[in-house]
Amino acid sequence: MIRGEDVTLIVCTRERPEMLRDALASFLEHSPEGLEILVVDSASTTSKTLEVADEAGVRAVRTDIKGLSIARNVGLATARRPIVVYSDDDCRALPGWLDAALAHFDDERVAAVTGAMLHEASDTAARQVRSPKRYTKTLEGLDAGHGAVMAFRRDVVEGLGGFDPVMGAGRYLAGAEDLDIFCRILDDGRAIVYDAEFAIDHAHTREDDAYTVLHRGYGLGLGALADKWLRLRPTVGLMMSAVIVKRTVVRAVRNRSNVRRRDADLALLGGFWSGLFATAGMRRAGRVFVDARPPQPITLDSPPPSAEIVDDPIRGGLAASAKAELISSLDEKYLVNDVVFAAMCAAGTMIVDGASLRGADGGLDRTAIRRLFEGASWFAPALRQRLVSTPLGVTTPAWVPVSHLDMSRHVRFADGIVADDPELVDALTGRSSPPLDRSRPLWDAEFVELDSGRVAIVFRYHHVVGDALFGLRIGDVLAGPTPLGEPLVPGPEELRVLGVPPRGGIHVLWLAFASWRALHPSLPEMGAAYWRKSFRMRLRRWAGRAIRPVKNARIRRSDAVARAMTGRSSQYAVVDFAAATKRAFRLGGTVNDLTVAATLHGVAAQRVGPTTVSLLVPISRRRAGDTTTRNDISVVKVTVPADASLEEMVPLVRVQVQEAVDAGGSIVVGEADWVGYATYVTWGRDQRFVGTASVETVTGWPAGDPKDEVAVLACSYRRDLVVSVTVGEGLDRRLLMSSIVDAFAGQPILRDA
């Protein structure tokens, strides 16, 4: 349930400090407890606006570039809460005005709520409450509400590029910025609810010629809106233009005896045609116009010391460009069919102190936890990208940004309480969780309460998202080195890096070609790059994409996925990292070599007959400091005599791994007789925190081939080395773990919670 602590009320204002004072007084009196109020001063010529905000005890930020949409975007980028509410300085709150609006956000599909704008408190007719109305179609954005009383999920508006900076009061195209964001939200598949109980009193401030000028500005904005949609979706744009013109003409005819209203309607119609042509040559970034000629800055000689000044409000206007990133052909192998897709899902479990994740009732604070992950997702762009296919499958699929994360689908909470036992970890491996949804970003997190009071956070992500080291970089964002009392808030740079979704498949292809062309600027370079792969290979890969839906349909009719994911069991153990490091050094290898050798030694002890035993060992080719490459690993097949001692195996592993490192690529020689794989990664020695909850143990559950008999991953964190073992039905898991622990330190370590 949304509470006041989840909401920022943004009041954009310019040159009206006295009206602002009255507005703030009403908002402070009638808003829910815990609500944050943020005043955005849109380039006022004096510091009085900032002084009024300071007197009221609310936060204020100033932009030196005027424009209502620019101010709204500055507020959006500055807000700290997941829900943002917008109102104006000429509005007055009514008792309980926000209660109805916030209740609608319990429905994850609702991205915005709008309300009634009443003209003075005596307007009793306007106070007649209607049933809430739900809008879902793009064209309905024209009727969805008014900018003086609207509430949004902050991440939805940010993901759509924010308000269009060239539209709205203070700019030539002086209107329709609210209708524009409504239309974009609806076109993105979200819903908007109008609820008349979400109401404010609004004072008329325009009379005579100013009233006519105001309506001409509305018309200019509507013309720009129509032109935008004529370019984005011509059918929608034509229907929108027809609706606007028809309504305005009918209204002007009806008001022909009312000179004031008739002139205003005619001014709106004239403004519409002017706005339609004014934006004809204007470039767009995603679905917002590029502000090529922003107004000149209006600076204050001596702003109040407490004032926050946005230096670059146009960049802070969230106008990010569309992005698309084709995956590599090697990464596409993780998607070849549903069985492989299910198997290539890696997981990591952080066990944390659960006290700070709980609410007043003692249960996990689900709203706060989801806010925490939603904020962090902006700083790990892979968490806000999904895969889309290109038209006819002519290329590999592409990563594109999503405009909104449905956190109820990505952050889940397990029922009941499970044992805090390293040998009973079925609920902590992610294998019992529902399959990842291909239509969404390929990750999720499940919170599992343990009987010790601790909480396990099971984070799953697909291998196509990245390898283990890439997953650790995501972990760096989700669990930072310092406690985090409030969720992270994205700034302009995070929005720019992520970008906005392309308009469709053709746009994805165009963006991919543009990126490829930038890497190969000349025709000879383009030709050489293209023909590095034969036409036959490209044709074979295209055919594979074309028949993939048919193959997957056949797999879904069988139980192939279920069979592939059953019959496996896991456990983990904790050993002393310093002792394991010393042991590996004495034996002539690294911790990675000892992990591999210990696994080989344990498997050999359970196998009768084979004279050798083999494992695959992943080797990262990632350069130091590389945080962007998703998958960059090679593998080496390591083979040792089955009757060798551990002391003999470690040097043999070291030689074969080093040979592959020196070669810079994979080395897999001989038969495909490996029993699985083993590897080691590190998450450093620093204490980490999920919010304010300290991370006590980190365990990895790697993705792997369902045919593998064993997968072992050792992960060092702080003083500990946590070893996870996953085996098929042919191996004794406890016996293998005992052998590996003995190889490292002799006995597992039991640490107090």
Image (cartoon, rainbow, N blue to C red):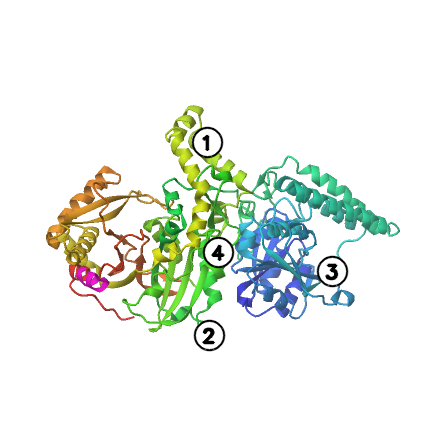
Report the Cα–Cα distance between label 3 and label 1: 55 Å
Report the Cα–Cα distance between label 1 and label 4: 34 Å
| Pointers 1 and 4 in contact (C-beta within 8 Å) | no
- Taking the magenta stretch, the answer to whether it contains residue 197 is no
Reading the image, the residue beneath label 4 is 489
- Residue at horizontal 74 percent and vertical 60 percent from the top: 203
Mark sitting earlier along the chain (2/1): 2
Reading the image, the residue beneath label 3 is 203
Q: Amino acid at mark 2?
A: Ala
Q: Position of residue 59 (x, y in %)?
A: 55, 60
- Residue lying farthest to the bottom in this orientation: 361
| Pointers 2 and 1 in contact (C-beta within 8 Å) | no
Q: Which of pointers 1 and 4 indicates the residue nearer the eye?
A: 1
Reading the image, the residue beneath label 2 is 360
Depth check, front residue: 448 or 389: 389
Q: Which of pointers 3 and 2 indicates the residue nearer the eye?
A: 2
Report the Cα–Cα distance between label 3 and label 2: 41 Å
Q: Amino acid at mark 4?
A: Val
Reading the image, the residue beneath label 1 is 517
Helix, strand or loop at mark 2: loop
Mark sitting earlier along the chain (3/2): 3
User: Image check: 269 left or right of 30?
Assistant: right
Q: Is residue 536 above or below residue 325?
A: above
